[in-house]
Image (spheres, rainbow, N blue to C red):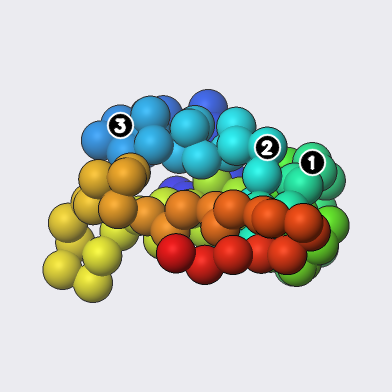
Amino acid sequence: MQTFTLAAMRNEHPDVFPQLVQQMQQPHCSRCGGTMVEETYMDIFSDYEDFQFQAKHCIQCGDVIDPFILLNRLRTHSGETPDVNSLSQPRHRENGLVMTG
């Protein structure tokens, strides 16, 4: 059974759990560097008992992350888990503009 909580991910995917926690605790968006805010989402079509889950939403670009989305991003097509440092990093800002490196 796949669930959306970090507690469940700890048991189901212990190999990537530290990386999931690190990514969920980031205060800035990995796409644009904007501010991430916590939100509660509801999946009314879910077959599971808990149809509410916590996720983070970027108020600037709209990117949404939750443990399940991050798990899919961490897993490559070959099934290997890349190092957390190889994931996309936030771009830095200068004078309000996003600078790519």
Determine whether, in the image, residue 31 is placed left or right of residue 85.
right
Q: Where is residue 26 in the image (x, y as percent from the top left)?
A: 60, 37
The mark lying in front, picked from 1 and 3, is 1
Q: In this view, does 92 lie above or below 18?
A: below
Residue 74 occupies which quadrant of the picture?
bottom left
Query: Which residue appears at 26% of the width and 65% of the height?
Result: 76
Q: Within 10 Å of the Cα at label 2, are there few (<14), some (14-19), or many (20+) other Cα atoms?
A: some
- Residue behind mark 3: 14
Q: Which of 57 and 31 is in front in this view?
A: 31
- Residue behind mark 2: 27
The mark lying in front, picked from 1 and 2, is 2
**Callout 1 secondary element:** strand
Determine whether, in the image, residue 23 is placed left or right of residue 44.
left
Query: Which residue appears at 77% of the width and 56% of the height?
Result: 95
Q: Which of marks 2 and 3 is nearer the N terminus?
A: 3
Q: Where is residue 14 in the image (x, y as percent from the top left)?
A: 30, 31
> How many numbered markers are drawn?
3
Q: Which of marks 1 and 2 is nearer the N terminus?
A: 2
Q: Is residue 94 visible?
A: yes
**Residue type of the residue flagged with mark 3:** Pro
Distance CA(mark 1)–CA(mark 3): 24 Å
Distance CA(mark 1)–CA(mark 2): 10 Å
Q: Which of 63 and 1 is in front in this view?
A: 63
Query: Which residue appears at 56% of the width and 57% of the height?
Result: 91
Query: Which residue appears at 23% of the width and 52% of the height?
Result: 82
- Residue behind mark 1: 38
Q: In this view, does 76 lie above or below 20?
A: below
Q: Do the residues labelled 1 and 2 touch (CB within 8 Å)?
A: no
Q: Earlier in the sequence, mark 1 or mark 3?
A: 3
Q: Is residue 4 above or below residue 11?
A: below
**Residue type of the residue flagged with mark 2:** Pro
